[in-house]
Each structure stands twice: as structure tokens, then as C-alpha cells.
Image (spheres, helix red, strand yellow):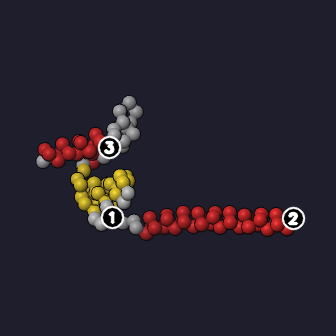
Amino acid sequence: MPGFFTGFVTFLMAAVIIFLSYVCSKYMGKGLVRASSSRYMRMLDQMIVGQNRTLVIVQAGGRYLLLGVGPDKIQTLAELSEEDLLPLGGAEGEPSLDFGRILSRIKRKKDEE
């Protein structure tokens, strides 16, 4: 019986440690987001497109920028207007848009300039 009790206490302690690790990492992550907030810029959306590669939409003042973020550089891909920022889900009765259609729309706009 003492072996069972020891095993149970060990299991319980491991569960408590895992739970506390989860809670601490969750709140530490939220603190980092708050610490990186800015009065003049904000990240509106991001999408992971590959390992260490992300597309990010950033609002800086009245400008909206589509940025490509890689492991060693950040590149401005396009400047977006407010009309380009459509929710992908679409509104009631409105067909949903996919990323390819939005990207082709931005390319056409860029070609017109």
C-alpha cells in the first residue's frame, strides 16, 4: 500500500507542476503582448505562411501595410487602402473572399499605378 500512495502523490505533484507551468506561460505571454503595444502602430492581423514566414497587416497612423516577415528581414509587400481590408468571412448574403482573390486584387491595383 505504501507504494501506491507514493505513486499517487508523485502523479499528483507532476499534474500540479504541469498546470502551474501552463498558467504561468499563459499570463507571461499576455504580458509580452501588452509590453509591445504602441500608441502609433498596431498589428491588425497575421497569417503564418510557412516555417518562420508570416504575412502581417500593420496600421501605422492612417496607413495600412502588408508586410512579409522572415527570419532575417521584414519587407513591405503592399500598401493597402481601407477598402482592401475586408473580413474574409463576408457579411450576411455576401460571398466569402479567399486570400488568393484579395492578393490578385492588390496586384491589379499595383499594376494600375
**Separation of marks 1 and 3 at Cα, in angstroms:** 23 Å
Tell me if residue 63 can be seen: no
Residue appearing at x 39%, y 39% in the figure: 89
Secondary structure type for disc 2: loop
Q: Is residue 93 above or below residue 70?
A: above
Q: In the figure, 90 relative to 65: above or below?
A: above
Q: Nearer the viewer, mark 2 or mark 3?
A: 2
* Residue that numbered label 1 is attached to: 71
What amino acid is at disc 1? Pro
Residue 99 tag number: 3
Q: Amino acid at mark 2?
A: Met
Q: Residue pushed farthest left?
A: 113
Sequence-wise, which precedes: disc 2 or disc 3? Answer: 2
Residue 60 position in % (x across, y down): 28, 60
Write down the residue under mark 2: 1
- Measuring from the top left, give residue 12's x and y in whole percent: 73, 64
Mark 2 and mark 1 lie on one chain; the one further toward the N terminus is 2
Q: CA distance from mark 2 to mark 1?
A: 55 Å
The CA distance from mark 2 to mark 3 is: 61 Å
Q: What SS does tag 1 mark?
A: loop
Residue at coordinates 72% horizontally, 64% vertically from top-left? 11
Nearest-to-viewer mark from 2 and 1: 2
Whether residue 25 is visible, yes or no, is yes
Residue 98 in the image: state x and y as whole percent. Answer: 33, 40
Is 107 placed left or right of 92 in the picture? left
- Rate crowding at label 2 as few (under 14), some (14 to 19) or many (20 or more) other CA atoms within 10 Å: few
Relative horizontal placement of residue 20, taking residue 9 as reference (left or right): left
> In the rendered structure, which disc, 1 or 3, sits on the residue that comes first in sequence?
1
